[in-house]
Image (cartoon, rainbow, N blue to C red):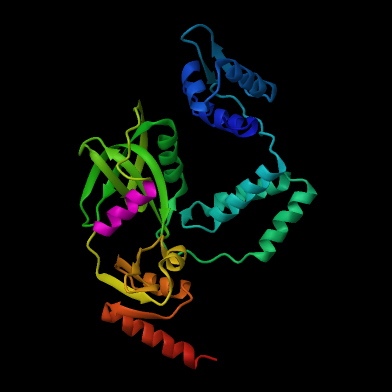
């Protein structure tokens, strides 16, 4: 069972969809008893949230439409966590960075001086790396996330890798952020199979209001599903590198990007493999592993590495 603070946030996020929630369903979602749920509802009312209740066996709860929502009181750690998240979002590859900065300004403005000093220290000590991935609309992400959270089907237009435009009707499962891109893992109702969709290729996503029973994902998790799909796509380059470092060392540095396997003839060496359309990714991987290496393929990567090494050796 989650602690009271996180459970209240979860309850509030469910009610703010303004749909009617049967009491039994809310209890299952929050993994609490009906009695605990009633106490939590009373706490929200004490904070000023106008929650309607229907009594009886089939009773439930709904946040009254048009209610003005008061700010939720946060613990110090929660306020800082929200501010850090907004600061990160403002520097990410998501359209809507301006809104993130506006929200961040409001959150920091409501903080007591001791917390503002912590946020000022974080800002002065942090340098944000530029994002080179395609940007996505923040409202698109929140619409998709709501579908994942509430088990609600989603419709959207999609432009495939080859340029074909289609309309999709899916059961959204999870959003995945990988290599500066966002992906949606979902069950496609028309094709009757699991798919991953690049969010920057989606258009006008809309929630349908239709609920679904979650299916079992045919993978360890959503990240593994996306990675497996990427590996099956035809790419311009098949990258193969040998590192003079054990597989576990290389795995910790670049395992999110590629497949790392031990060298069967040398326990102190390992192989790195990935398929990509851009040789900048394996170059980033090479720099992340502090070990000698040999580029086995492709020759274009070996040439780029030699050229980069020559420039670095002559730089002042």
- Residue 209 relative to residue 191: left or right: right
Q: Residue furthest right?
A: 113
Give residue 134's quadrant in the image: bottom left
Q: Is residue 316 above or below residue 46?
A: below
Residue 198 seen in the figure: no
Q: Nearer the viewer, residue 179 or 224?
A: 224
252 in relation to 142, above or below:
below
Q: Which region of the structure is painted magenta?
A: 222-232
Task: Tell me if residue 172 is in the magenta stretch.
Answer: no
Q: Is residue 272 left or right of residue 77?
A: left
Q: Position of residue 11 (x, y in %)?
A: 56, 28
Q: Residue at x 61, y 29 (%)?
A: 8
Q: In the displayed structure, does residue 260 sit left or right of residue 49?
A: left
Q: Residue at x 27, y 42 (%)?
A: 194
The residue at 33%/79% (across/down) is 295
Establish if 239 lies above or below 53.
below
Q: Is residue 230 magenta?
A: yes
Toward the viewer: 70 or 125?
A: 125
Give how far across and how far down residue 144 sits, in percent. 40, 40
Which residue reaches farthest bottom? 314
């Amino acid at each position: 069972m989650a602690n009271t603070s996180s459970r209240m946030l979860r309850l509030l996020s469910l009610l703010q969809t303004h749909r009617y929630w049967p009491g039994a369903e809310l209890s299952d979602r929050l993994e609490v008893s009906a009695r605990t749920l009633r106490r939590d509802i009373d706490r929200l009312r004490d904070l000023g949230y106008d929650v309607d209740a229907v009594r009886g066996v089939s009773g439930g709860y709904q946040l009254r439409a048009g209610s003005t929502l008061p700010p939720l009181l946060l613990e110090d750690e929660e306020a800082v966590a929200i501010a850090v998240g907004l600061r990160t979002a403002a520097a990410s590859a998501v359209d809507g960075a301006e809104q993130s900065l506006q929200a961040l300004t409001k959150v920091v403005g409501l903080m007591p001086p001791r917390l503002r000093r912590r946020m000022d220290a974080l800002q002065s000590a942090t340098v944000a790396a530029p994002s080179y991935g395609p940007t996505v609309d923040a409202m698109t992400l929140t619409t998709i996330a709501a579908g994942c959270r509430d088990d609600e089907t989603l419709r959207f237009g999609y432009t495939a890798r080859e340029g074909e435009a289609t309309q999709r009707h899916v059961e959204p499962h999870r959003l995945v952020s990988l290599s500066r891109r966002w992906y949606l893992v979902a069950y496609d109702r028309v094709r009757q199979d699991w798919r991953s969709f690049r969010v920057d290729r989606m258009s006008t996503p809309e929630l349908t209001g239709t609920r679904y029973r979650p299916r079992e994902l045919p993978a360890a998790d959503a990240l593994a599903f996306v990675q497996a799909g990427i590996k099956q796509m035809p790419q311009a380059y098949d990258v193969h590198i040998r590192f003079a470092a054990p597989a576990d060392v290389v795995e910790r540095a670049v395992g999110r990007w590629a497949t790392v396997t031990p060298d069967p003839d040398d326990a102190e060496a390992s192989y790195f493999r990935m398929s990509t359309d851009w040789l900048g990714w394996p170059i980033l991987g090479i720099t992340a592993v502090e070990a000698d290496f040999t580029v086995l393929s492709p020759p274009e990567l070996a040439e780029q590495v030699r050229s980069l090494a020559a420039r670095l050796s002559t730089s002042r």
